[in-house]
Image: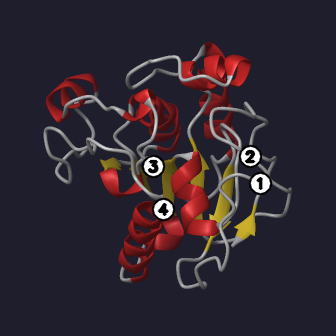
Amino acid sequence: MVAARGIAGDQGGRAGLRPVAGLAMAALMILMRHGQSEFNLHYTATRRDPGIVDPKLTEAGQAQAEAAARALAGAGIRRILASPYTRALQTAAPLAAALGVPVAVNPIVRERFAFTCDIGSPRSALQQAWPEHDFGAIEEVWWPDAEETAEVIIARAARFRAQMKGRNDWADTLVVSHWGFILALTGQSVTNGTWLRCDPHAPAPETIVWHP
């Protein structure tokens, strides 16, 4: 996996977040963590779950999304794949508008279910808020009802890796996702509003450190 510098973001919300090293961009799939959410803001300050269901972006998170849209304008993105959580869809919105590309919503890239913030919104509500997006891949209730183990999200990341290998447009795809999923897929921890460039044909990480 190759790291590319993103936008400086919130350091909290999940354990062990670290900045992404700055390297020149390459023609690889982009994995972006959503902008700072209301959950991230409160959890960073208290280290306690604030009990916010499907949180929205903060003003800082919205600014991170808009800055990313400007920074990625020349990255050759032709397709955006986004998690169904509101924080991810709000992050994808300015990117889709700036780049003029469609957004496909798929729960395979959602966060590891562990906190109140990982309770989502029904598909019908999301379709009403973002009628221009493709919600064909999700059910009305698409999030689980119990905490996911590390093995579960690692297996989900492996399924995604296999799916992307079979597509001919993976190098033109931007994936708007979350800390836990990106960590499971790449072994790297990213801050809010930052992104990595990666090749789905590369080997899966040998070790994933959830709590360094």
Q: Determine which residue is flagged by label 4.
A: 173
Seen as rendered, the residue at the extreme right is 22
Instruction: Give the alpha-carbon distance from disc 4 to disc 3, as whole Å.
Output: 21 Å
Give the amino acid type for the residue marked by disc 2 in the picture.
Answer: Gly
Q: Is residue 181 left or right of residue 26?
A: left
Mark 1 residue type: Pro
Circle 2 is placed at which residue position?
16
Q: Quadrant of residue 135?
A: top left
**C-alpha separation, residue under disc 2 versus residue under disc 3:** 15 Å
- Residue 97, image x and y in percent? 46, 35
Q: How many angstroms separate mark 4 from mark 2 (CA)?
A: 27 Å
- Look at the numbered discs 4 and 2 and tell me whether their residues touch, using CB distance below 8 Å: no
Q: Are marks 2 and 1 in contact (CB under 8 Å)?
A: yes
Q: Quadrant of the C terminus?
A: bottom right
Amino acid type, residue under disc 3 in the picture: Arg
**Would you name the residue on which mark 1 appears?**
212
**Disc 4, SS:** strand
Q: Earlier in the sequence, mark 1 or mark 4?
A: 4
